[in-house]
Image: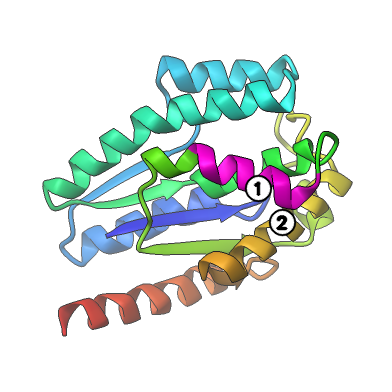
Amino acid sequence: MFIVVEGIDGTGKSTLARMLGNYLRDRGCRVFLTEEPTDSWLGKAVRQGIEEEKNPFTQAFLFFADRAEHVNLIKKHLEIGEDVICDRYVYSTYAYQGAQLETQMSLPRALSWLEKLYEPIGLKPDMVFLLTVEPERGLRRIGSREKKEKFEREEFLKRVQEIYLLLAKKYDFAVVDSNRSLNEVYGEIVKLIDKQLEEKEK
């Protein structure tokens, strides 16, 4: 099973991805936990592109270069029977770079362009959890970080989340309110995972 956890910064997605991995391991599953950008040199190039505030097209190409290799890695783990949990995937690029590209073109055109880039390398997840949070609250949660990316601005994150919600309708994400406590959010995700596993075992 290929599971993706998405959301703007401050939703708790990285922590919840790890908790979900531990939950599945406790159920006897073999789990590969991964993230985007990756830890490879390509992923480091993505982070450098963000830090240097390269233009949205450059950043999009960097993300897709990293993802092209990452998809091959995910496939290998799925082929040997492992469940894969990914903290951020292509939908992050659609949402974040989509918001940036709105300065260059309409959102529908931007999303269409990004989707076409992804299509040849695409790997569809079995489940996508979109964690939502009030951007102001999300920023408070990450306020202790020493360095904030330029993406971590309230108005920008508000727009990114709006795009995420559009994507949720299009791609049938499970939308989970993460304004609540971590345990409440985790409990809801576990229920949804259990339901999926039960249907898979039928």
Q: Position of residue 42 (x, y in %)?
A: 45, 18
Question: Which tag, 1 or 2, sits closer to the chain's start?
Answer: 1
Disc 1 crowd rating (10 Å Cα; few below 14, some 14-19, many 20+) is many
- In the displayed structure, does residue 78 sit left or right of residue 126? left
Disc 2 crowd rating (10 Å Cα; few below 14, some 14-19, many 20+) is many
Name the kind of residue labelled 1 in the image. Answer: Leu
- In the displayed structure, does residue 26 sit left or right of residue 177? left
Residue linked to disc 1 = 111
Residue at image coords 81%, 52%: 159
Nearest the eye: 23 or 128: 128
Nearer to us of marks 1 and 2 is: 1
Residue at image coords 48%, 41%: 118
Give the CA separation, mark 1 to mark 2: 10 Å
**Displayed quadrant of residue 127:** bottom left
Residue at image coords 35%, 63%: 126
Q: Which mark is residue 163?
A: 2
Above or below — where is 55 with respect to 177?
above
Nearest the eye: 66 or 181: 66
Secondary element type, mark 2: helix
Magenta stretch: includes residue 56: no
Above or below — where is 32 with respect to 48?
below
- What span is colored magenta in the figure? 106-117
**Displayed quadrant of residue 57:** top right
**Contact flag, marks 1 and 2 (Cβ < 8 Å):** yes
Name the kind of residue labelled 2 in the image. Answer: Ile
Q: Which mark is residue 169?
A: none
Above or below — where is 170 with respect to 155?
below
Q: Main secondary structure of the magenta part?
A: helix
Secondary element type, mark 1: helix
Nearest the eye: 30 or 3: 3
Assign the C terminus to one quadrant of the image. bottom left
